Amino acid sequence: MIEFRSATKRFADGTVAVKELDLTVEAGTITVFVGPSGCGKTTSLRMVNRMVEPTSGTVLVDGADVMASNPARLRRSIGYVIQHAGLFPHRSVLDNVATVPLLSGWTRRRARSRAAELLELVGLAPELGSRYPAQLSGGQQQRVGVARALAADPPVLLMDEPFSAVDPVVREGLQDELLRLQNDLDKTVVFVTHDIDEAVRIGERVAVFADGGRLAQYVPPAELLAAPADDFVADFVGRDRGYRGLSFLDAGALSVGDVPTADVGATLTGVAAGPGEWVLALDAERRPRGWLAPDSALRSAAVSRPLAESDLLAGGSLYTRGTALRGALDAALSAPSGLGVVIDETGRHLGVVTAGQVLDLVERRRATRHDPEPGAER
């Protein structure tokens, strides 16, 4: 557990970076600090490992005041991940990960063995251990940074905008990896970001910081989206917070419809599609490859060549069945056909949904939630 008790940081020029912060991070949870630049979220994070020392107030880790601990020993006991990974360029990946165990007195053999285990844990191939940071992609470097932070098995993990320097696709994969690791390792994680979508996606609780180092709201993400504490929080979360709120609605009752399909590499003979219907192209493993538009020349009876991927329009995002409603709505809105493609966990096509179906389900749930109990007066 991490506790901030009236923790304040005032710099020599009089600037207040954090103002009387009272906040408790429960053990075994991911708490996200989010807010605009200069609001004190990173300063608050760094007070936990004494990279920044509070001017007044107290910061405790498992009941112990961090100011009573030796700074070097404290930092070795807390994992720390930053932007761009912060790896040592002259050391191999394996030796980067082994750094903290070696500083803690482990033998070189034991430390390197632990490093190899962690590379596998964060999804990196063993052969990458002999490479140097410059030989890795940005996403791979960030995974190494996470592995290094976990090397001495710390109970607390601090992450300061660790994924902000990578592209959106890699970033989402790293977020998924963090959630998977947390499910396995059960660390106490404090994660700093300026991205509200990232905050509500990975946080079990979200702390929104305002200018002047003020804590504006600290609640679970669904509550943050549903009931912002004030105008600042509402503006920061954004006017589309209702859309973000779909991330917390289960799509189990969403019905999946049919759509005409065709196999890539085969002719369209026998495809039962009307003149105005879109056709979904699938590969040999029944995975979606794209859409064939109603006005495509290949739909003409005079054309009989096999369907090629160059004939297709990109299909938008895909929705994995059983996940949150936000993904289903996004799939429908991003598809050129207006039909969200539904897949199973292996990526195989299951059917399609429309944006109207998603919104109808939301309305039905809202109506059910506000219906009076049986026998109650209306």
Image: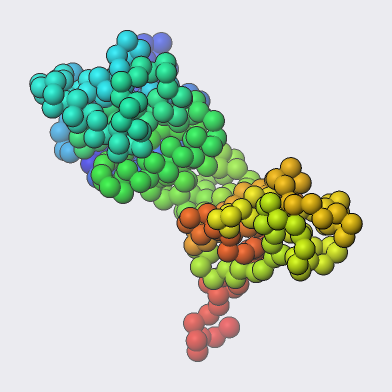
Outermost residue on the front side: it is: 305
Q: Quadrant of the C terminus?
A: bottom right
Judged left or right of residue 236, residue 301 is right
Q: Residue at x 16, y 38 (%)?
A: 63
Counting from the top left corner in percent of width and height, residue 321 is at 52, 61
Asked if residue 319 lies left or right of residue 19, the reply is right
Residue at 58%, 55% in the rendered image: 284
Q: Is residue 159 left or right of residue 197?
A: left
Q: Is residue 334 above or below residue 154?
A: below
Residue 333 seen by the camera: no
Q: 310 or 171: which is nearer to us? A: 310
Residue 19, position as x, y percentages in the image = 38, 29
* Residue 49 drawn above or below residue 280: above
Residue 261 visible in the snapshot: yes
Residue 50 rendering spot, x and y as whole percentages: 25, 22
> Foreground: 58 or 285?
285
Q: Residue furthest right?
A: 302
* Above/below status of 362 relative to 103: below
Quarter holding the N terminus?
A: top left
Residue at 26% x, 42% y: name it: 187
| Relative to 264, 215 lies left or right | left
Query: Can you tell which quarter of the image residue 95 is in?
Result: top left
Which residue is at the front of the view, 217 or 242?
242
Colour mapping: rainbow
